Image (cartoon, grey):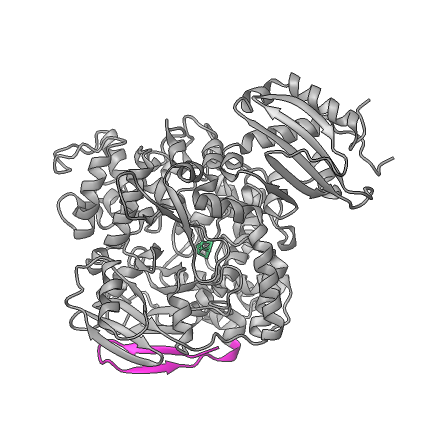
Amino acid sequence: MQPILTVDLTTGATGTLEIPAEWARDYLGGASLAARILYDALTPELDPFAPQAPLLFLNGPLSGTSGPTTGRFVICGKSPATGLWAESNIGGFWGVELRKTGYDGLLLTGAATDPVYLFIDAGQVQLRPAVHLWGQDTYEIQTAINAEIEGATARVLGIGIAGENRLPAALLLSDHGRVAGRTGLGAVLGSKQVKALAVRGAGAIPVADTTRYNPLRSAANRALHQDNLTASLRDLGSAGGADYFDYLGEMPKKNFTAGTLAGVDNLSGASIAETILTGVSACHACVVACGRVVQLPGEKEKRKGPEYETLMGLGANLGITDAVFVTRMGDLCDRLGMDTISVGNTLGLAFDFYARGRLTAADTGGLALEWGNAAAVETLLPQIARRQGFGAQLAEGARAFARRYGDEDAAVQVNGLEAAYHDPRGASGIALSYATSPRGACHNQSDYFIVEIGQAEEDLGLQFFGRQAGAEKSANVAIHQDWRTVFNSLVICVFGNVPPQTVVDLINAACGLEWDIPEMLRAGERGWNLKRAINNRLGLTRANDRLPRALLEPLPDGGSAGYVIPFDAMLRAYYEARGWDWATGKPGRDKLEALGLGWVAEDLWPAT
Amino acid sequence: MPSIFPSEEWLLELKDYINQDEKYAHIARNWEGDVMFHIEPTGALIEPLCFYVDLWHGECRGVKMVPTGDLTEAAFDLTASYDNIVKVLKGQLDPMQAMLTRKLQVKGSMPYMMRNVPTVLEFVRCAQDITGQVLGEN
Ligand code: SF4
């Protein structure tokens, strides 16, 4: 693999980090390799906003190779939202551009004294003043930076006001609204006084065996283009399944307290396709093109359309069913640099408290936080990003807000990360995804709901269980997590419905390996356990593998009414499948050694 | 005794069954769309086979085997191998799993299809209910 560019923002010193070949083989790349690289640096004492906190931008061996959904990279570090492992992957074009500069990654440490942006131009690295960009939104900085550099367009990845203000929900955005939304890494970049990272490269993307890779890539892209899921994602976006999720009771409403909501079909991908959709957008070389381009009534300009999580977070979760409004608010969050999942979830909690009389207009600066009150949302989003007024109370996220009112368990979050919009009562496997993900209540470390509705790949050993089955599916969830850990190493997109054997063939050709599916799953399991070990070192125990109260109570209506998740039994079966220690929550010594993580076993299980 | 799949008799039986099934009538009450099934030869099926089902507002209005050269068009085309269709009909392969693991290809309006997944699943349930013996079984 190509080296990693290192930049010390305190001194301005740059260098390169060469990655040992066996690390690149065992961890493949992306998030798992990042975990290996950052293992020693992520200590319990490390403040995510301290200058020495590392922030690593890393591609995978397939990034930018024009294989199926390979235009992605990952950002990793220590999360200000959770205090645990942070990982957020993102599409667009920035990561590919970085690879073209001759670096597979960028490792930032230190902090600048005044706002700067970094410009990596085909191997030349400059720190440039960004005082004039501080306060600008995530689209404005792309235009402004490109106006002041000469020559071809650079790809710009940057933060908004939320990142400057160190919100735990702060994101990084590039291109036409592609975001690394989760775990607050935009705040880490902001803490380093870095507004943006501009990249321009012209080199080739390295592939071990192009003679083998290129025909495989073409065939895989042709097949993916014809795929049913691709057709749904291209025609309807990521909200294509919304109607079905609603039917199943898998779509959350009103802070996960309601199973039905009149008019919620307005928020589906089908409805958007029939009303405001004017085109699609794609990450680098992606044949799926799940991105939405919409035109709102009365507007001339086209803009980014909302994806599923935004539609739910700023829509159904708040009792709002106006897709045009949600589109505008999603765009506002992007510009302010806030993750729509976390912000929508935190607002949902405030609305919920208001509905229960635990908050009044006297607390909210006069805002009536009644379900469906869109005007209140529009008022609060800038307040949150700026930490002003009642927004300042919401700016630290749902857990902190609930703590303020003496009821932490009211927040629909795990370990500080707000839950995404897949309700485990409608499809129970995501309960384990949320409870055991290395980054909190995340749906992308295992989007297990897709297995529950049918994507149970037999080649991976996945079985097809009933959506409200219990402990019998725990081992299945673990397999799916391992497979998604492979995706997050490559780095490829969970939306790419590529047959597992094809994925393995592509990796082998790109990396010069001869692995089979079980070997690849083992690499995924290795990465999953390594991230778990990092979190154990940071203080995580079995007590952290939990669900918030709201998800353990039955819903009153809708497609999953009355169902209670057998969570304790599921978790116990999961631990057995994983080979984890029930007393401590750590991966067992034998498991670690079997995965080639003996060095981690020495750390987690020191000889007494 | 149930008719053998695939056959004209099986299709007619499917039509009658759908038209007396209250659950289907309720869930599919807004469905408007005919479907062409393209079955590729595998296992006991040695020639491609095509049949047509006209579904409208919770009813089945018509069915027919479609000979090669017939120019009938439908709102949706479903394509699968004979072996996979049989697995679906026998409940050994979930229809959504077939769609999401590339064993059954769908062509037609995606907005319509994704709004009406429960109708599709109810249709399959009816087809499963009437399927007994299949070609290639003794
Ligand atoms: S499917 Fe969508 S998010 Fe995934 S790589 Fe393609 S365009 Fe990007």
Q: Is residue A230 above or below residue B21?
A: below
Ligand 1 shown in quarter = bottom left
In percent of the image, x 18 and y 64: which residue is there? Answer: A133
A574 shown above or below A185: above
Please tell me which residue lies in front, A573 or A177.
A177
In the image, is residue A247 above or below residue A96?
Answer: above
Return the residue nearer the eye: A8 or B77: B77
Residue in the picture at 64% in, 39% down: B78
Q: Residue at x 30, y 73 (%)?
A: A108
Rendering quarter of residue A466? top right
Which residues lie in the magenta part? A1-22
Expressed as whole percent of the image width and height from the top left, the position of residue A435 reads 43, 48
* Image side of residue A559 versus residue A378, left or right: right
Residue A580 visible, this orientation: no
Q: Position of residue A438 (x, y in %)?
A: 42, 57
**How many labels sit on residues?**
0
Considering the image in quadrants, where does the C terminus of chain A appear?
bottom left
